[in-house]
Image (spheres, rainbow, N blue to C red):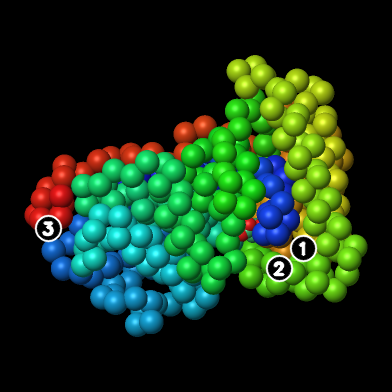
Amino acid sequence: MTVSSAPGKVYLFGEHAVVYGEPAVPCAIERRATVTVDARSDDHIRVQARDLSLDGFTVEYAGDTAERPDVDVPEGLVDAAMGYIDAAVEQARDAADAPDAGFDITVESEIPLGAGLGSSAAVVVAGIDAATRELGVELSKEEIADRAYRAEYDVQDGQASRADTFCSAMGGAVRVEGDDCRCIETPNLPFVVGFDGGAGDTGELVAGVRDLRAEYGFAADTVESIGDIVRAGEERLYDADPDSEPTADLLAELGRLMDFDHGLLEALGVSSRTLDNMVWAAREAGAHGAKLTGAGGGGCIVALDETPETRTALRYTAECRDAFRAELDREGVRVESAGDGTAAADRGDA
Ligand code: PMV
């Protein structure tokens, strides 16, 4: 049995614009998805999912998700969860050259689904790490990031950037521009997350921005301006000392840029009343800045505040279901408990 975990993320800046080749800076946070993988003697996949912000479900199937499991949860969420796990299994089988490997898989996650915190990327990253290790193969973090991206790309019909998967695999703050992904050394940033209990439809929101951008030159300019915000923000991060607490100047400027970014995302139609209300609650509580994170439409906002004020204010905000401090996670994917290698040896794969 092998257990691996990987973090979720917030976007400091750049969601949506990253789809059109602009840079983005996501940051991994200390909220993890944990995947337990046990090799089977047949080629079946049995998946048990708990704490995914939906009622736990268990399904067993031999082929792919075309053979619909019989479970009592909304179809869309089952399809989504099963699709990602399927894709992760395919990547692990390919990496370990074990096309018939079967697994019992348990997924546990502290990251709300579809809420802009990179839940699917964390599950895919942790799943690939655990399943390959279970088959006796150890991939580098970069390889896991690349395979996780390909898995998401397949599930999301090509509408995926490398941002979530690279960030979850590597940890810390990262910069993604097209296929160019790198890590940024940053001081610890005092993130506070507010969650409205909902989820946006990433595909629909991305399509909405695509249409606006195609129709109006000023919408295309707005997307480019988000790229300018990211470039300004990353310059400030490169100048900062990663081993010290962030300075007041750094937090003030990052906050101002986050506010600006949120305004442009709002103009592109991807915010919502609940997200806006949480953003304003954070700003009025004294946060340096606040913005939606991820695809938008509902889900989470991220604010910068080193004091307890923003979290308290969010907790008293009607639209906010949960508010928590989210420490920067510098580690990325990690193995929690390694198998003894007998699974691979039994199969004759290692
Ligand atoms: O909501 P999330 O965490 O899946 O983020 C989506 C971010 C987008 O930029 C809108 C899409 C993408 O693949 O980068």
Indicate the amino acid at tag 1: Val
Residue 52 rendering spot, x and y as whole percentages: 48, 59
Foreground of the two, 132 or 262: 132
Please tell me which residue is depicted at 70% across the width and 22% down the height of the picture. Answer: 240
Question: Residue at label 3?
Answer: 347
Mark 2 or mark 1: name the one nearer the start of the chain.
2
Which residue is painted at 80% across and 72% down in the image? 214
Q: Which residue is mark 2?
A: 205
Q: Using the rendered image of the protein, determine whether residue 281 is visible from the camera's viewpoint.
A: no
Q: CA distance from mark 3 to mark 2?
A: 44 Å
Q: Name the residue that disc number 1 marks.
A: 270
Q: CA distance from mark 3 to mark 1?
A: 48 Å
Helix, strand or loop at mark 3? helix
Give whichever of discs 3 and 2 has the lower sequence position.
2
Assign a secondary structure to mark 2: helix
Classify mark 2: residues with Cα within 10 Å, few (<14), some (14-19) or many (20+): some
Asked if marks 2 and 1 touch (Cβ < 8 Å), the reply is yes
